[in-house]
Amino acid sequence: MHATERDRVILNLLEEQRFVSFRDLSRRLSASAATLRRDLERLQEQGKLKRVRGGAQIGAESEITGFHLQGVPFHENVNRNSAAKEAIGKAAAALCHPGEAVIIDGGSTTLQMCPHLEPLKLQVMTNSLHIVSALLQQPNTGVSIPGGVVFREQNIVLDPFVEASTRSFHASRMFLGSAAITRHGLMQSDIILVQAERKLLSLADQLIALMDASKFGNSAAHLLCELPRLHTVITDSRISDASAKMITENGVKLMVVDS
């Protein structure tokens, strides 16, 4: 592929996603690492992108502070399907073992785990300031957060570029939600959210998705992880037979709770 065509692909990806990883560029362009480095250096000199750890982004790294996440803001989502979310959160908390290390991803359903965790004396990593606030009331629960930027709409901390703050943490399981769950897997509406959450996924032995049944009818643009990567999906009794079959046929354990 000619350099001009590679430049076009790189810039189109950045326009769509704001950030693109070096690994993704290598896969899409079938170019050598040395060629990609020269391409990115040239485009950076032209002011068309900013090279960052693991890839490239539009503009200066500090511009991430001006981003707004796509999707429903937390304050609008927290009261939707609240009974189902409470039941799912309680069931998820029951899967935790005393003293273990877990990751709890930010979300209105994962937040509902918090009232049930204090007796377990867990070590919790979370990117959610709502979850941090809830767990700080529990003297026996250890709390850590990854470094990054606060996104006010979701009240979460994200940084898809730097890995040092999370590299030493290992969890037996990660509890997470998403904007939608489809035959492709867990989907999110924002690529920045996906890039940051994928780093956390790699730190856990098991992935447990907390999804109220309405998420099976949603759609979103970006794949967070494929269905077979999940260990368990916890949802409520409104799930359709077709959606339940989709989960179990991918070898994923399905837990259905009454809401």
Image (cartoon, rainbow, N blue to C red):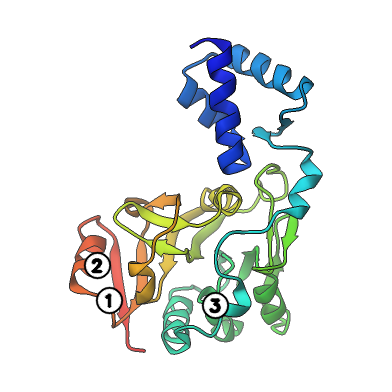
Rendering coords of residue 183 (x, y %): 29, 55
**Helix, strand or loop at mark 3:** helix
Residue 172 higher or lower than 63, as above or below? below
Q: Which residue is mark 1?
A: 239
What amino acid does circle 2 point to?
A: Ser
Q: CA distance from mark 2 to mark 3?
A: 22 Å
Q: Taking 6 as reference, is 154 left or right?
A: right
**Which is more foreground, mark 2 or mark 3?**
3
Whether tag 1 and tag 2 are in contact, CB under 8 A, the answer is yes
Residue 86 x/y as whole percent: 47, 86
Q: Quadrant of the C terminus?
A: bottom left
Observer-side mark, 3 or 1, equals 3
Q: Estimate how packed mark 3 is, as few (under 14), some (14 to 19) or many (20 or more) residues with alpha carbons within 10 Å.
A: some
Sequence-wise first label, 2 or 3: 3
Instruction: Name the secondary structure under disc 1.
Output: loop
Circle 1 crowding by C-alpha within 10 Å: few under 14, some 14–19, many from 20: some
Above/below status of 6 relative to 142: above
Number of the label disc, if any, that sits on residue 217: none
Q: Which mark is residue 243?
A: 2
Q: Earlier in the sequence, mark 3 or mark 1?
A: 3
Q: Position of residue 72 (x, y in %)?
A: 55, 69
Which dot marks residue 77? 3
Q: Residues within 10 Å of mark 2 (few under 14, many from 20)?
A: some
Residue type at numbered disc 3? Asn
Q: Say which residue appears at 45% left-offset and 52% top-offset.
A: 221
Q: Position of residue 116 (x, y in %)?
A: 54, 85
Residue at disc 2, secondary structure: helix
Report the residue at 49% width, 21% height from top.
29
Vertically, is 68 above or below 122? Answer: above
Instruction: Tell me whether the residue at label 3 lies in contact with that at label 1, contact meaning CB atoms closer than 8 angstroms.
Output: no
